[in-house]
Amino acid sequence: RETFDGNDNIGAGGEPQQQAQANHPPLTTQQGIVVADNQNSLADAKHGATLLEDFILREKITHFDHERIPERVVHARGSAAHGYFVLTDSLSGFTTAKVLTETGRRIPVFARFSTVAGGAGSVDTPRDVRGFAVKLYTEEGNWDLVGNNIPVFFIQDAMKFPDLVHALKMEPDRAFPQAAPAHDTFWDLISLMPESMHMVMWIMSDRTLPRSLRMMEGFGIHSFRLVNAEGRSTYVKFHWRPALGVQSTVWDEALKLQAADNDYHRRDLFEAIEAGAFPAWDLCVQLFTEEQAQTLPFDHLDPTKIIPEELIALRRIGQMVLDRWPDNFFAETEQVAFCPANVPPGIDFTNDPLLQGRLFSYLDTQLLRLGGPNFAQLPINAPQCPFANNQRDGHMQTQRPHGRVAYEPSSLQADSPRACRATGFRHFAQAAPTGTKGRLRPESFADHYSQARMFYRSQDTVEQSHLASALVFELSKVETAHVRMAMVSHLLVIDEDLGKRVAQGLGISPLPRPAEPAMPVLNLDPSPATTLIGRM
Ligand code: HEM
């Protein structure tokens, strides 16, 4: 909208000319005091000293000084949009969650896509995992599906997450690289952590060079539970599938795009939404029982494993459409707080040890990042259903609870909130495993190479050569020879030809001894002919 009114200069004496009029309301301080002059600070004379008395200057500068908040410790760079989700296939019988049982309703959503390693001001197109976080404002409270565009993760236990992130982000002494895995500390840790090998295959594939945020899959990764009215649990994995299909750039394109436009993905998403080409994703689920889980050749509670769709087929249950760009980047994209612990009744967690750690970490970090315990009151985070509790006070309390009662049980106030057995969240009554307490990892988590091999061999020859070239490029930036050697020894186990190609690209000869897997490496068949064990 044109706002120029030919009145934008300050006068000869420095007096402001732009003044409030018809469409331009008076400018005020935070206290509502109308400002007469927004150009000049208060001085004791022309050429005189600025006076401390100038409350308008002090308030303006103080607010500006406090504009930055800590960026996310990971996934700092992101772009987001509003939209809606519509369920088309009810999962009643599996869950009580209305968002998964009541078809045809428009549930508001806010989705944020991010890179992982770079800071908030970094570029959009490095080789990196992309975050895929969706907040669904359901009538039973917020459901946050906080996933990535890759269906597995680097580590099996949250205990290792700080190490992973410290190794991945810029090195603390030299402060580079700012947004890429091409450096010693990352590959040092990875080479000592065979559980990462499956993820390494995915991140070195074209998946980490998405052509557009609109063309990425999203994965909830962990097995979650659906819980029905009888308290019966069914395992579920969540998948978002883009209507535009999965598309990637090749490395050379990514490099050129990065040089030409640091905001390539953000601009693309913005322009698509502004043009009415609303991006859409199908929500699909893999549903399976405890008995089916027991027949899988790997442990589904290990987040470095997928369940191949050839074994448990995807069931499409609804669609998400993003149709509105945020009004304000800071208020919405920056202040949104996703947390995997936000689930409505009828959805529950599993004992995946990575998920268990995440359930703690997000709220904890947001208490710091968003300045205290009331960030859920921010409009982007607040539920869009009635909510009331006895929590009170704290930094930036914006609500005005009434009455004397902020406790329960109570008898003094007719409208104080009370727990509700009929509609309240109930945890699945899982039988506790037997055993002795300890820092323990199941033996079934010990196969680190079979699915890495399966992924590599599921790629066509062009994709395999991209993957090998990516490894050569990334590892060629690693200065420490034994780290490069260690990685080649893992690759030789995943696929001998891949290991040899990368060794040749790096000029490594003779070949190192292959790594020694803790368990025999399976030749899992990724072809669609594999027997389905279930579609529920
Ligand atoms: C942020 C995904 C593992 C801690 C994020 C975000 C995503 C994400 C998408 C950005 C959310 C946004 O857009 O605001 C994942 C996935 C994981 C994983 C898919 C594994 C399956 C972990 C683990 C931890 C962790 C194991 C810690 C134990 C964090 C923290 C943030 C974050 C602290 C910043 C949150 C904020 O400041 O709001 N993660 N993450 N993540 N993640 Fe994870």
Image: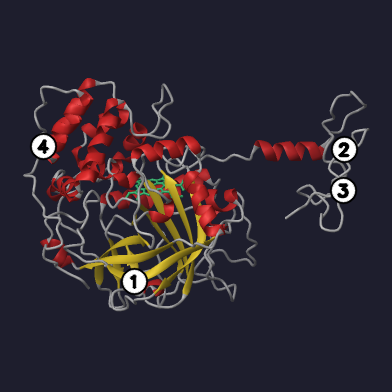
Looking at the rendered structure, the kind of residue marked 2 is Ile
- Residue at the disc numbered 3: 19
How far apart marks 4 and 3 lie (CA) works out to 74 Å
Mark nearer the N terminus (1 vs 4):
1
How far apart marks 1 and 4 lie (CA) works out to 40 Å
Residue 261 % position (x, y): 50, 39
Residue 153 % position (x, y): 28, 47
- Residue at the disc numbered 1: 317
> Front-most of 394 and 499?
499
Mark nearer the N terminus (1 vs 3):
3
Residue 199 % position (x, y): 25, 44
Does dot 3 land on a helix, a strand or a loop? Answer: loop
Horizontal side, residue 439 vs residue 348: left or right: left
Q: Which of marks 1 and 4 is in front?
A: 4
Answer above or below: position of 101 versus 216: below
Answer above or below: position of 159 versus 226: above
